[in-house]
Amino acid sequence: MATGNATAAATGTAPRRRRAATVVAGALLLVATVPLVFRAAGSDGVTPVPQLLAFLPWLLVPAGLALALSLAARWRPGLFWAAAVLLGLTAFVRPYGDGAPAPHGAPLARLRVLTANLEFGRATDGLLAALRRESPDLVAVQECDPERCATALDSPAVRAAYPFRLLAGHGASEGSAVLSRFPLRADGAVAGELAMPRASVTVQGHRLRFQVAHPMPPLPASLATWRTELGRLRDLAAARGPEPLVIAGDFNSSQDHAAFRAVLEAGLHDSAGRTGSPRTPTWPARTTPVLGAQIDHVLVSDALRPRAARFLDLPETDHRALAVDLELYATR
Protein backbone atom coordinates (compact mmCIF):
# COMPACT_ATOMS: atom_id res chain seq x y z
CA MET A 1 0.00 0.00 0.00
CA ALA A 2 2.83 2.42 0.88
CA THR A 3 4.52 1.59 -2.41
CA GLY A 4 1.33 2.41 -4.28
CA ASN A 5 1.02 5.79 -2.54
CA ALA A 6 4.62 6.65 -3.39
CA THR A 7 4.05 5.73 -7.03
CA ALA A 8 0.89 7.86 -7.17
CA ALA A 9 2.72 10.79 -5.57
CA ALA A 10 5.55 10.49 -8.08
CA THR A 11 3.06 10.25 -10.91
CA GLY A 12 1.34 13.44 -9.73
CA THR A 13 4.62 15.31 -9.25
CA ALA A 14 5.76 15.00 -12.86
CA PRO A 15 2.75 16.83 -14.37
CA ARG A 16 3.07 19.57 -11.76
CA ARG A 17 6.73 20.04 -12.65
CA ARG A 18 5.90 20.18 -16.33
CA ARG A 19 3.18 22.74 -15.68
CA ALA A 20 5.59 24.84 -13.60
CA ALA A 21 8.23 24.61 -16.32
CA THR A 22 5.64 25.66 -18.89
CA VAL A 23 4.60 28.69 -16.84
CA VAL A 24 8.21 29.79 -16.29
CA ALA A 25 9.05 29.25 -19.97
CA GLY A 26 6.03 31.30 -21.02
CA ALA A 27 7.01 34.15 -18.69
CA LEU A 28 10.59 34.17 -19.98
CA LEU A 29 9.41 34.14 -23.57
CA LEU A 30 7.04 37.01 -22.91
CA VAL A 31 9.91 39.09 -21.49
CA ALA A 32 11.97 38.43 -24.63
CA THR A 33 9.14 38.64 -27.15
CA VAL A 34 7.69 42.05 -26.28
CA PRO A 35 10.89 44.08 -26.93
CA LEU A 36 11.64 41.90 -29.95
CA VAL A 37 8.28 42.78 -31.51
CA PHE A 38 8.91 46.50 -30.95
CA ARG A 39 12.43 46.15 -32.37
CA ALA A 40 11.02 44.51 -35.49
CA ALA A 41 8.36 47.21 -35.76
CA GLY A 42 10.94 50.00 -35.51
CA SER A 43 9.44 51.47 -32.36
CA ASP A 44 10.75 52.06 -28.84
CA GLY A 45 7.33 51.71 -27.21
CA VAL A 46 6.70 52.59 -23.59
CA THR A 47 8.24 51.44 -20.32
CA PRO A 48 9.65 48.81 -19.91
CA VAL A 49 10.32 48.32 -23.64
CA PRO A 50 13.02 51.03 -24.10
CA GLN A 51 14.85 49.80 -21.03
CA LEU A 52 14.76 46.17 -22.26
CA LEU A 53 15.80 47.17 -25.78
CA ALA A 54 19.10 48.48 -24.40
CA PHE A 55 19.95 44.90 -23.45
CA LEU A 56 18.44 43.16 -26.49
CA PRO A 57 21.36 40.74 -27.12
CA TRP A 58 21.15 39.52 -23.52
CA LEU A 59 17.54 38.46 -24.06
CA LEU A 60 19.03 35.43 -25.81
CA VAL A 61 19.64 34.06 -22.29
CA PRO A 62 15.99 33.91 -21.11
CA ALA A 63 14.93 32.77 -24.57
CA GLY A 64 17.46 29.93 -24.49
CA LEU A 65 16.38 28.96 -20.98
CA ALA A 66 12.76 28.98 -22.12
CA LEU A 67 13.68 26.63 -24.95
CA ALA A 68 15.25 24.20 -22.48
CA LEU A 69 12.26 24.38 -20.13
CA SER A 70 9.82 23.84 -23.01
CA LEU A 71 11.77 20.78 -24.04
CA ALA A 72 11.73 19.43 -20.49
CA ALA A 73 8.01 20.12 -20.17
CA ARG A 74 7.27 18.65 -23.61
CA TRP A 75 5.52 21.91 -24.45
CA ARG A 76 5.53 21.92 -28.24
CA PRO A 77 4.12 25.46 -28.73
CA GLY A 78 6.84 26.72 -26.40
CA LEU A 79 9.51 25.02 -28.51
CA PHE A 80 8.33 26.76 -31.68
CA TRP A 81 7.87 30.07 -29.84
CA ALA A 82 11.35 29.94 -28.29
CA ALA A 83 12.95 28.97 -31.60
CA ALA A 84 11.26 31.91 -33.34
CA VAL A 85 12.38 34.34 -30.62
CA LEU A 86 15.96 33.07 -30.74
CA LEU A 87 16.07 33.44 -34.52
CA GLY A 88 14.62 36.95 -34.33
CA LEU A 89 17.04 38.08 -31.64
CA THR A 90 19.98 36.62 -33.54
CA ALA A 91 18.98 38.55 -36.65
CA PHE A 92 18.95 41.85 -34.76
CA VAL A 93 22.24 41.28 -32.95
CA ARG A 94 24.10 42.03 -36.19
CA PRO A 95 25.67 45.50 -36.53
CA TYR A 96 23.34 48.19 -37.80
CA GLY A 97 24.12 50.81 -40.44
CA ASP A 98 27.67 49.81 -41.41
CA GLY A 99 27.50 50.41 -45.15
CA ALA A 100 29.43 53.66 -45.50
CA PRO A 101 31.38 54.18 -48.74
CA ALA A 102 35.15 54.28 -48.36
CA PRO A 103 36.61 57.78 -48.78
CA HIS A 104 38.87 58.40 -51.78
CA GLY A 105 42.31 59.93 -51.87
CA ALA A 106 44.77 60.65 -49.10
CA PRO A 107 43.49 61.84 -45.73
CA LEU A 108 43.70 65.57 -45.08
CA ALA A 109 44.28 65.12 -41.36
CA ARG A 110 44.28 62.56 -38.59
CA LEU A 111 42.80 63.15 -35.17
CA ARG A 112 41.81 61.31 -32.03
CA VAL A 113 38.46 61.90 -30.32
CA LEU A 114 37.68 60.90 -26.75
CA THR A 115 34.30 60.96 -25.02
CA ALA A 116 33.78 60.38 -21.30
CA ASN A 117 30.88 60.62 -18.89
CA LEU A 118 32.35 61.45 -15.47
CA GLU A 119 29.27 60.61 -13.33
CA PHE A 120 28.79 63.96 -11.60
CA GLY A 121 32.50 64.78 -11.95
CA ARG A 122 33.65 61.88 -9.78
CA ALA A 123 35.90 60.48 -12.53
CA THR A 124 37.76 63.76 -13.11
CA ASP A 125 41.09 62.29 -12.01
CA GLY A 126 40.55 59.33 -14.31
CA LEU A 127 39.83 61.69 -17.20
CA LEU A 128 43.03 63.65 -16.54
CA ALA A 129 45.00 60.40 -16.56
CA ALA A 130 43.33 59.36 -19.81
CA LEU A 131 44.19 62.70 -21.41
CA ARG A 132 47.85 62.20 -20.54
CA ARG A 133 47.84 58.57 -21.67
CA GLU A 134 45.74 58.78 -24.84
CA SER A 135 46.59 62.34 -26.00
CA PRO A 136 43.25 62.93 -27.78
CA ASP A 137 42.88 65.97 -30.00
CA LEU A 138 39.18 66.57 -29.30
CA VAL A 139 37.41 65.66 -26.06
CA ALA A 140 33.70 65.55 -25.25
CA VAL A 141 33.02 65.51 -21.50
CA GLN A 142 29.63 64.85 -19.95
CA GLU A 143 28.58 65.33 -16.32
CA CYS A 144 31.39 67.81 -15.75
CA ASP A 145 30.48 69.36 -12.42
CA PRO A 146 31.40 73.03 -11.93
CA GLU A 147 33.54 72.47 -8.84
CA ARG A 148 35.81 69.49 -9.38
CA CYS A 149 35.73 68.91 -13.14
CA ALA A 150 35.58 72.49 -14.40
CA THR A 151 38.29 73.54 -11.94
CA ALA A 152 40.57 70.69 -13.01
CA LEU A 153 40.10 71.46 -16.70
CA ASP A 154 41.13 75.05 -16.00
CA SER A 155 44.47 74.01 -14.50
CA PRO A 156 47.66 75.25 -16.21
CA ALA A 157 48.65 71.72 -17.31
CA VAL A 158 45.32 71.05 -19.02
CA ARG A 159 45.21 74.53 -20.55
CA ALA A 160 48.70 74.02 -21.99
CA ALA A 161 47.63 70.74 -23.62
CA TYR A 162 44.14 71.96 -24.61
CA PRO A 163 44.18 75.72 -25.10
CA PHE A 164 40.75 75.76 -26.73
CA ARG A 165 37.58 74.76 -24.87
CA LEU A 166 33.87 75.23 -24.31
CA LEU A 167 32.11 74.80 -20.98
CA ALA A 168 28.33 74.60 -20.69
CA GLY A 169 25.81 73.77 -17.97
CA HIS A 170 25.94 74.48 -14.28
CA GLY A 171 24.99 71.31 -12.41
CA ALA A 172 26.80 68.08 -11.64
CA SER A 173 24.87 66.14 -14.27
CA GLU A 174 24.09 69.05 -16.62
CA GLY A 175 27.66 70.22 -17.18
CA SER A 176 29.48 69.42 -20.43
CA ALA A 177 32.81 70.45 -21.91
CA VAL A 178 34.71 70.41 -25.18
CA LEU A 179 38.51 70.38 -25.09
CA SER A 180 40.55 70.87 -28.24
CA ARG A 181 44.13 71.11 -29.42
CA PHE A 182 42.77 72.89 -32.48
CA PRO A 183 41.23 76.36 -32.69
CA LEU A 184 37.48 76.37 -32.15
CA ARG A 185 34.58 78.71 -31.77
CA ALA A 186 31.16 78.19 -30.23
CA ASP A 187 28.67 76.99 -32.84
CA GLY A 188 25.43 76.85 -30.86
CA ALA A 189 24.02 73.88 -29.00
CA VAL A 190 21.35 71.21 -29.15
CA ALA A 191 18.64 72.11 -26.67
CA GLY A 192 18.24 69.65 -23.82
CA GLU A 193 17.87 69.17 -20.10
CA LEU A 194 21.60 68.37 -20.04
CA ALA A 195 24.05 70.68 -21.79
CA MET A 196 24.96 69.69 -25.36
CA PRO A 197 27.30 72.37 -26.75
CA ARG A 198 28.68 72.42 -30.29
CA ALA A 199 31.95 73.80 -31.63
CA SER A 200 33.27 74.65 -35.08
CA VAL A 201 36.83 73.30 -35.07
CA THR A 202 39.61 74.08 -37.54
CA VAL A 203 41.77 70.98 -38.00
CA GLN A 204 44.90 71.74 -40.00
CA GLY A 205 43.05 74.30 -42.07
CA HIS A 206 39.86 72.22 -42.46
CA ARG A 207 36.68 72.91 -40.52
CA LEU A 208 34.46 70.36 -38.87
CA ARG A 209 31.58 70.57 -36.43
CA PHE A 210 31.93 68.83 -33.07
CA GLN A 211 28.75 68.20 -31.10
CA VAL A 212 28.49 66.85 -27.56
CA ALA A 213 25.62 64.37 -27.09
CA HIS A 214 23.91 63.86 -23.73
CA PRO A 215 20.16 63.37 -24.08
CA MET A 216 18.15 62.44 -21.02
CA PRO A 217 18.10 58.72 -20.16
CA PRO A 218 14.97 56.73 -21.08
CA LEU A 219 13.59 56.58 -17.55
CA PRO A 220 9.82 56.19 -17.22
CA ALA A 221 9.42 59.87 -16.30
CA SER A 222 11.67 61.17 -19.10
CA LEU A 223 10.83 58.99 -22.10
CA ALA A 224 9.24 61.84 -24.06
CA THR A 225 12.23 64.10 -23.36
CA TRP A 226 14.64 61.33 -24.39
CA ARG A 227 12.86 60.90 -27.73
CA THR A 228 12.66 64.66 -28.33
CA GLU A 229 16.35 65.26 -27.62
CA LEU A 230 17.50 62.35 -29.78
CA GLY A 231 15.22 63.78 -32.46
CA ARG A 232 17.06 67.09 -32.21
CA LEU A 233 20.37 65.30 -32.72
CA ARG A 234 18.84 63.59 -35.75
CA ASP A 235 17.71 66.97 -37.11
CA LEU A 236 21.23 68.33 -36.67
CA ALA A 237 22.66 65.37 -38.60
CA ALA A 238 20.09 65.73 -41.37
CA ALA A 239 20.78 69.47 -41.80
CA ARG A 240 24.54 69.33 -41.26
CA GLY A 241 25.61 70.88 -44.59
CA PRO A 242 28.94 70.22 -46.32
CA GLU A 243 31.18 70.41 -43.25
CA PRO A 244 32.18 67.09 -41.62
CA LEU A 245 30.30 66.37 -38.41
CA VAL A 246 31.23 64.47 -35.25
CA ILE A 247 28.65 63.81 -32.54
CA ALA A 248 30.30 62.29 -29.46
CA GLY A 249 28.98 61.51 -26.03
CA ASP A 250 26.59 59.56 -23.87
CA PHE A 251 23.55 58.99 -26.09
CA ASN A 252 21.70 56.97 -23.44
CA SER A 253 20.68 54.68 -26.30
CA SER A 254 21.98 51.74 -28.29
CA GLN A 255 21.60 50.55 -31.86
CA ASP A 256 18.47 48.70 -30.79
CA HIS A 257 16.63 51.95 -30.07
CA ALA A 258 14.67 53.34 -33.00
CA ALA A 259 15.36 56.90 -31.85
CA PHE A 260 19.12 56.27 -32.06
CA ARG A 261 18.91 54.49 -35.40
CA ALA A 262 17.13 57.56 -36.76
CA VAL A 263 20.26 59.59 -35.97
CA LEU A 264 22.38 57.12 -37.93
CA GLU A 265 19.91 57.10 -40.81
CA ALA A 266 20.34 60.87 -41.11
CA GLY A 267 23.76 60.14 -42.60
CA LEU A 268 26.10 59.26 -39.74
CA HIS A 269 28.16 56.18 -38.90
CA ASP A 270 29.02 54.66 -35.54
CA SER A 271 32.80 54.57 -35.15
CA ALA A 272 32.83 51.56 -32.83
CA GLY A 273 30.64 49.60 -35.22
CA ARG A 274 32.78 50.46 -38.22
CA THR A 275 35.95 49.33 -36.44
CA GLY A 276 34.55 45.95 -35.37
CA SER A 277 33.14 46.66 -31.90
CA PRO A 278 29.41 47.24 -32.44
CA ARG A 279 28.32 45.57 -29.21
CA THR A 280 31.12 46.30 -26.74
CA PRO A 281 29.30 47.56 -23.62
CA THR A 282 30.05 50.97 -22.15
CA TRP A 283 27.44 50.99 -19.37
CA PRO A 284 27.10 50.07 -16.54
CA ALA A 285 30.83 49.99 -15.96
CA ARG A 286 30.54 47.63 -12.98
CA THR A 287 29.42 44.75 -15.22
CA THR A 288 31.24 45.59 -18.45
CA PRO A 289 32.62 44.10 -20.59
CA VAL A 290 30.69 40.96 -19.65
CA LEU A 291 27.24 42.53 -19.41
CA GLY A 292 25.96 45.91 -20.47
CA ALA A 293 24.92 48.13 -23.35
CA GLN A 294 26.87 50.33 -25.73
CA ILE A 295 25.31 53.74 -25.16
CA ASP A 296 28.43 55.92 -25.53
CA HIS A 297 29.22 56.62 -29.17
CA VAL A 298 31.29 58.67 -31.58
CA LEU A 299 29.20 59.24 -34.71
CA VAL A 300 30.81 60.65 -37.85
CA SER A 301 29.73 61.80 -41.29
CA ASP A 302 31.08 60.37 -44.56
CA ALA A 303 34.18 62.59 -44.72
CA LEU A 304 35.52 61.02 -41.52
CA ARG A 305 36.81 57.45 -41.47
CA PRO A 306 37.24 55.63 -38.15
CA ARG A 307 40.46 53.63 -38.02
CA ALA A 308 40.43 52.32 -34.43
CA ALA A 309 38.26 52.46 -31.31
CA ARG A 310 39.29 51.70 -27.74
CA PHE A 311 37.13 51.45 -24.64
CA LEU A 312 38.74 52.86 -21.51
CA ASP A 313 37.94 52.03 -17.90
CA LEU A 314 37.93 55.16 -15.73
CA PRO A 315 37.57 54.86 -11.94
CA GLU A 316 34.56 56.35 -10.16
CA THR A 317 32.14 56.46 -13.10
CA ASP A 318 29.38 54.17 -14.35
CA HIS A 319 30.48 54.65 -17.99
CA ARG A 320 33.49 53.50 -19.96
CA ALA A 321 35.20 56.17 -22.01
CA LEU A 322 35.66 55.75 -25.76
CA ALA A 323 38.68 56.88 -27.79
CA VAL A 324 38.45 56.83 -31.60
CA ASP A 325 41.14 57.49 -34.21
CA LEU A 326 39.74 59.27 -37.26
CA GLU A 327 40.97 60.28 -40.69
CA LEU A 328 39.51 63.40 -42.30
CA TYR A 329 38.96 63.36 -46.05
CA ALA A 330 37.84 65.99 -48.53
CA THR A 331 34.07 66.25 -48.86
CA ARG A 332 32.65 65.44 -52.27
Image: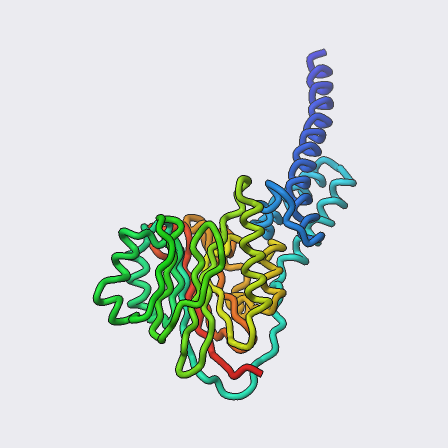
Left or right of 1, for residue 264: left
Q: From this viewpoint, which residue is outermost toward the right? A: 76
Q: Nearer the viewer, residue 79 or 143?
A: 143
Q: Nearer the viewer, residue 52 or 71?
A: 52
Quarter of the rendering occupied by the N terminus: top right
Say whether residue 311 is visible.
no
State the colouring used for the structure image: rainbow
Say whether residue 164 is visible.
yes
Q: Is residue 144 above or below residue 73?
A: below
How many numbered marks does the figure carry? 0
Q: Position of residue 87 (x, y in %)?
A: 70, 54
Q: Position of residue 331 (x, y in %)?
A: 55, 81
Q: Nearer the viewer, residue 320 or 169?
A: 169
Quarter of the rendering occupied by the C terminus: bottom right
Q: Is residue 58 above or below residue 126?
A: above
At x 68% / y 51%, what residue is drawn? 86
At x 44% / y 81%, what residue is drawn? 206
**Hey, which quadrant is residue 320 in on the image?**
bottom left
Left or right of 219, for residue 135: left
Q: Position of residue 10 (x, y in %)?
A: 69, 23
Q: Position of residue 128 (x, y in %)?
A: 29, 62
At x 48% / y 75%, what residue is drawn? 307
Q: Nearer the viewer, residue 271 or 177?
A: 177
Left or right of 124, for residue 219: right
Q: From this viewpoint, which residue is outermost toward the bottom? A: 105
At x 36% / y 64%, what residue is drawn? 166
Q: Is residue 304 above or below residue 47?
A: below
Q: From this viewpoint, which residue is outermost toward the top? A: 1
